[in-house]
Image (spheres, helix red, strand yellow):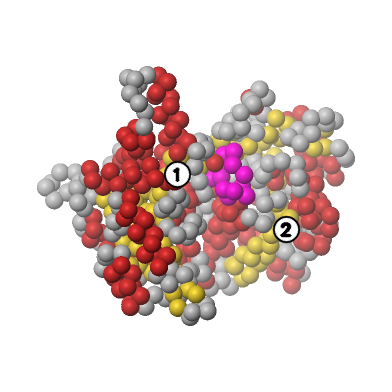
């Protein structure tokens, strides 16, 4: 992780104060506050500033770890094992900066802290109230970021939800107080809102934005800038109208138009002088943003020379946000391979009923992602059998690796009833079993093997040729492991265990050697992929899929893994 602090010097010669930018949203959710916050962070770093960033989530869950993916989307796991909102994935990818538990704070965490203090008698018998106790704890969680990794120039704080949500009010009140307690140019409010285009009227409508800002002003917050999410370009008269009714210059009304890729958003915003306006408000002198590498990355995304299909077989395929980091990792890997990766979403339930050949016959690779629960597992196992036998590139992640072990045990070792102890307790051959330190755990939240752990990689492996290293560190989120009681049987049948924990007790990576590219990993490599530095496994998996497709159209020679480090 790169250093955060830059020790910027203020006008008086003393160390400059940390500035705060608060990003709120209005009208509807899912407008892209996380992308906007991450884009701003990227642009400020491109100007040489040190930046930290956080998400305040108003829900009462302590973290999203036990929430249904259909409600919340992906759970993003950090190096320190924190289970966080998927927006932290955007933060890490855009800023190329590892986050910690302090970068995602929920209302559940805030209230848990306050109630714990109250039970300990820390408030000396005072009546515990939203103001000042809740708002003070929120402000403390924000200010904590100032010095955790060294003094930073700017902290960007995204407030979850929308203006008008009851649960968001304490957070909005807290940031209002922070602005009052700070200098005039030490804080900035940016409000993301919606400017819809009405087909029947043939024009964009500004009233939703006007009413959203009105609601924000009623709370006591006057935004300094608007980001207007729109499908149509906002002409100057529209921007002037919005500025007039929202009490700001039209130059502070920024068009956040729909983009073909989220990675184009910071470039679109910067073309309108976005970061210049922020520098102006916060009174910071900094050179222009150097976005050359980012522009090159976006160009590679938009102008690929190859095109491949990768099937993702899972049970949440109707909700793409459940696999957000995987989607982004394929974009990064595609850019490095000059390939457009078309993702084919296949329900594992459909595979179970319709057969793998029907759904996988026209793709160039298969990824089985992580997940929990027995539903759809048989479809995943059948998919793995199909690609193993047909020499199609395969990457299994977490449960995907475990399904690959089950498939190999059944079809190569002849253990017909091999399965995972997660799904069935009365098993003759539990090739996947509960970790020893998990056996007496009853709570679900935060009790799995979570966060970054080291692994040792066999130099004679496809995995090593991807990483170019024998020692790696990757993030985990699971409770079950490869059962070591079957290690000898499986390896004698040909399965290679090419990645192990440093003590040799836990199997981290498996491979099938007589296959062009077949890798299963117990960890989640997608969580460490970055836009200008794709994860090695995704990069090489996509490269293998490109070779596989070329072999289908030109059968000689047979595809194989490269012999040198990628």
Residue at which label 2 appears: 346
Q: Position of residue 534 (x, y in %)?
A: 53, 56
User: Which stretch did the figure color magenta?
Assistant: 65-79
Q: Is residue 129 visible?
A: yes
The reply to whether the magenta stretch includes residue 69 is yes
Name the mark on residue 167.
Answer: 1
Q: Position of residue 148 (x, y in %)?
A: 34, 37
Furthest toward the left, the residue is 12
Crowding at mark 1 (Cα within 10 Å: few <14, some 14-19, many 20+): some
* Residue depicted at 43% across the width and 27% down the height: 115
* Residue depicted at 32% across the width and 73% down the height: 241
Name the quarter where the N terminus is drawn: top left
Q: Is residue 256 visible?
A: no
Q: Position of residue 27 (x, y in %)?
A: 45, 60
The reply to whether the magenta stretch includes residue 356 is no
Name the mark on residue 540.
Answer: none
Label 2 to label 1, Cα distance in Å?
37 Å
Crowding at mark 2 (Cα within 10 Å: few <14, some 14-19, many 20+): many
Query: Picture quarter containing residue 278?
Result: bottom left
189 relative position to 400: left or right: left
- Label 2: element kind: strand
């Amino acid at each position: 992780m790169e250093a955060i602090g830059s020790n910027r010097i203020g006008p008086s010669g003393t160390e400059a104060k940390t500035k705060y930018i608060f990003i709120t949203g209005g009208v509807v959710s899912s407008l892209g506050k996380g992308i906007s916050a991450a884009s701003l962070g990227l642009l400020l770093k491109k100007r040489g500033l040190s930046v930290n960033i956080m998400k305040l989530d108003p829900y009462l869950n302590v973290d999203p770890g036990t929430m249904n993916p259909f409600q919340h989307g992906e759970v993003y796991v950090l190096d320190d094992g924190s289970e966080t909102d998927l927006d932290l994935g955007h933060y890490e990818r855009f800023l190329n900066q590892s986050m910690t538990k302090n970068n995602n704070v929920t209302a559940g965490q805030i209230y848990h802290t306050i109630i714990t203090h109250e039970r300990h008698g820390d408030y000396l018998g005072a009546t515990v109230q939203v103001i000042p106790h809740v708002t003070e704890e929120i402000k403390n969680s924000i200010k904590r970021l100032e010095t955790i990794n060294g003094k930073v120039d700017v902290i960007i704080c995204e407030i979850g939800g929308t203006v008008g949500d009851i649960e968001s009010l304490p957070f909005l009140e807290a940031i209002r107080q922070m602005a009052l307690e700070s200098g005039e140019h030490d804080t900035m409010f940016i409000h993301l809102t919606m400017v819809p285009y009405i087909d029947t009227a043939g024009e964009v409508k500004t009233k939703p934005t006007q009413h959203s800002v009105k609601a924000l002003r009623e709370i006591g917050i006057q935004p300094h800038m608007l980001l207007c999410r729109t499908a149509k370009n906002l002409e100057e008269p529209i921007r002037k109208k919005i500025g007039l009714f929202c009490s700001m210059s039209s130059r502070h009304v920024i068009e956040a138009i729909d983009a073909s890729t989220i990675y184009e958003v910071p470039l679109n915003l910067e073309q309108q002088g976005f970061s210049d306006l922020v520098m102006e408000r916060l009174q910071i002198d900094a050179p222009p943003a150097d976005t050359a590498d980012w522009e090159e990355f976006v160009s590679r995304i938009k102008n690929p020379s190859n095109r491949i299909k990768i099937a993702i077989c899972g049970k949440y395929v109707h909700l793409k946000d459940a696999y957000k980091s995987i989607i982004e990792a394929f974009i990064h890997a595609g850019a490095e391979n000059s390939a457009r990766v078309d993702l084919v979403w296949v329900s594992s339930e459909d595979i179970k009923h319709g057969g793998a050949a029907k759904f996988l016959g026209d793709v160039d690779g298969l990824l089985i992602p992580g997940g929990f629960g027995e539903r759809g597992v048989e479809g995943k196992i059948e998919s793995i059998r199909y690609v193993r036998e047909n020499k199609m590139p395969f990457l299994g992640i977490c449960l995907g690796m475990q399904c690959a072990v089950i498939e190999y045990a059944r079809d190569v070792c002849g253990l017909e009833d091999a399965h995972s102890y997660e799904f069935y307790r009365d098993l003759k051959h539990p090739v996947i079993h509960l970790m020893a330190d998990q056996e007496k755990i009853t709570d679900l939240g935060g009790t799995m093997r979570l966060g970054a752990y080291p692994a040792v990689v066999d130099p004679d492996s496809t995995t090593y040729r991807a990483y170019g290293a024998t020692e790696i560190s990757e993030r985990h989120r699971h409770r079950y492991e490869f059962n070591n009681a079957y290690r000898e049987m499986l390896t004698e049948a040909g399965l290679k265990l090419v990645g192990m924990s440093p003590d040799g007790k836990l199997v981290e990576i498996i491979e099938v050697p007589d296959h062009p590219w077949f890798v299963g990993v117990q960890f989640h490599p997608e969580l460490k992929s970055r836009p200008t530095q794709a994860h090695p496994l995704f990069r090489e998996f996509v490269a293998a899929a490109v070779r596989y497709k070329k072999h289908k159209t030109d059968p000689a020679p047979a595809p194989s893994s490269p012999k040198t480090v990628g």
